[in-house]
Amino acid sequence: EQVPAAVLEHLERLALVDFRDAEGVQRLREAVRFAERLHEVDTEGVEPMDSVLEDRCLYLREDDVTEGNCTKELLKNAREKIEEYFVAPPGNIPLPKLEERETFEQQS
Amino acid sequence: MTISFSRKDTEPMETARAAACHARGGTVPAGQSGLASWLPVVGLEIHAQISSNSKLFSGSQVQFAAPPNSLVSFFDASLPGTLPVLNRRCVEAAVMTGLALNCSINKKSLFDRKHYFYADLPAGYQITQKRVPIAVNGSLSYSLCIDNKMSRMVTKTVRIKQIQLEQDSGKSLHDDTRSQTLVDLNRAGVGLMEVVMEPDMCCGEEAAAAVRELQLILQTLGSSKAIMAEGQLRVDANVSVHHPGEPYGVRTEVKNINSVRFLAKAIDYEIQRQIEELENGGTILNETRAFDSKLGCTISMRDKEGKQDYRFMPEPNLPPLILYDAKSLPANRNHQQVVNIDWIRERLPDLPSVKRAKLVELYGILPEHSFTLLNEDGLAEYFENVIKHTQMKPKKVIGWVLKELLSYLKEHALAVKDSPVSSFLLADLLNLLERKEISSSAAKQVFEELWKGEGKTPLEIVKEKHLELLRDQEELEQICQAVIDRQEDEVMAIKAGNQKVLNKLIGLVQRATRGRSNPVLVKQILEKKLQSE
């Protein structure tokens, strides 16, 4: 079925994912349909598995300082920097509302 | 640096409100227009930075005030291909804290991702424990004075909903003039314990007392240094009001509180603001508000982005955290990989409440004294050291420590460890007093002199200023006689039956001897002389 435009907008805003065009939305629809097949299995009384690592041992590290001190290397990734600080915009720039954006619906 | 939550700091207004708050069972009477009283509800979310050498999931150092981005590993900067590795010390800190707060420790707890975008959160999500945190269902007991003189203390309890391990974010420095934010990731990934309290409190004073006690507990355990001024303890308050018997009102979240004192102020302001708003027919929005310490009010931080959807999901890179106890210890595991809850419980230090009870029992001091002793860093040790080196009874020593020493320290804004009068010096001074070599007022003069820190001993000061109690009975009798001879009116009054005037004569003798006479002895001599006249 159709994914409502409001849901699309919500997803794009939350995940900053750009569905871009009808093909992108179609791929989303197919992914949802694929995942919905899980409902065919009766999971009554079964504890959900949330990680394939569930029977692995969580490794505990000793509290030693073994990393860090690589400011120069890290800052190589920065488009802008000031005195070893990363520079970012003053706050989150909210995604423009659906009406203000060029979306696939407007394009098609 | 010493944190103090001294009774003197709290304004009389706040204490009066708190006293009234407790007397009425927590309600606030209606304002001008209202008919029914209001019940404020306060819940706290506290983030305590774990005291550890390295971060929660990486080996970068944890340190306050270091060059920007120098304590950051590739994982902390969220570079691709990096994975979290859990720090054992952080787990132990959380278990200790959970045990100290009477929690059930979950032998199996899980990690989750909480997603939101912000420049100081490079991964775009925070690793936290949403579904199954490490500790649940505990309690914190704290004490409150319900009158101004600190003589009536009442014990209250707040339930702890849970304690969870999570990552701290980096720091954003807002540069409004250049319309940009500078980001320092040194703090990104530092381990935090989030302590969630149930909304069992009713006013700022209760919240402040609870936080103060939690701070002391964390510092005693060593699991967090919990210094609010260094951001090691951050408190957010959830505040709402409702009429008794009705459902809870809409709550607001108050942030940006930098001290225990401001916590009380912020909460009380917000309670008042909500009451006034509702009594004027307005509504309360479920929003986040920032406390402005200069203006003493809360300001809306209304989010342009609307309500956040954090899209919680299990952290796929971390298996469940399994903790053991004596019964469930695995046989073949390397013990460095095993956290044993019972082992940790056996090694918990005495918590503040236990320390206080011991001080009261051992030394016969009042409960409120024990609170003050523990409230100042190092004061309890100072007190015990004085006791060790003096013959004076603890009940008298406590007066000197809490009145003279503490007031001088406060006046000069000094910590106990920086006191110019060491516990040994004070003990020496108190011994002189106890052996009746000087009077109490002379002792105070000596203390003032000792405070100058010129390296003189109490005995040297006494000799220098001739403060010894007059031992010469004859000299004392002469002075008394002189006073009697001069004060004819007073003598007549005493003989007529007005005994109170005798105190005036005693005072005059004290003055004549510059505080070097024993008032009890003086009284005896005067009485004897007056009788025989």
Image (cartoon, rainbow, N blue to C red):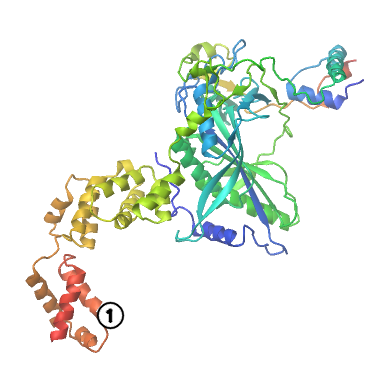
On the image, the x and y values in percent for residue B88 come to 51, 22
Quarter holding residue B80 = top right
Query: Residue drawn at (59%, 23%), measured in percent from left and top?
Result: B322
| Lateral position of residue B125 relative to residue B395, left or right | right
Q: Is residue B414 visible?
A: no
- Judged from the image, the secondary structure of the residue bearing numbered disc 1 is loop
> Up-down: is A38 above or below B263?
above
Q: How many marks?
A: 1
> Up-down: is B239 above or below B132?
below
Q: Depth check: give the residue in front, B318 or B36.
A: B318
Quarter holding residue B171 = top right
| Lateral position of residue A43 relative to residue B24, left or right | right
Q: Is residue B522 visible?
A: yes
Q: Depth check: give the residue in front, B356 or B505.
A: B356
> Up-down: is B406 above or below B510?
above
| Lateral position of residue B349 relative to residue B490, left or right | right
On the image, the x and y values in percent for residue A62 come to 48, 18
Q: Residue furthest bottom?
A: B496
> Up-down: is B449 above or below B288?
below
On the image, the x and y values in percent for residue B517 come to 16, 67
Chain of the residue under the numbered disc 1 shown in the image: B
On the image, the x and y values in percent for residue B122 come to 61, 20
The quadrant in which the C terminus of chain B is found is bottom left
The quadrant in which the N terminus of chain B is found is top left
Q: Depth check: give the residue in front, B47 or B299.
A: B47
Quarter holding residue A33 = top right
Query: What residue is shown with label 1?
Result: B500
Label 1 Cα neighbours within 10 Å, binned few <14 / some 14-19 / many ≥20: few
Query: Residue drawn at (76%, 18%), measured in percent from left and top?
Result: A17
Q: Depth check: give the residue in front, B280 or B217.
A: B217
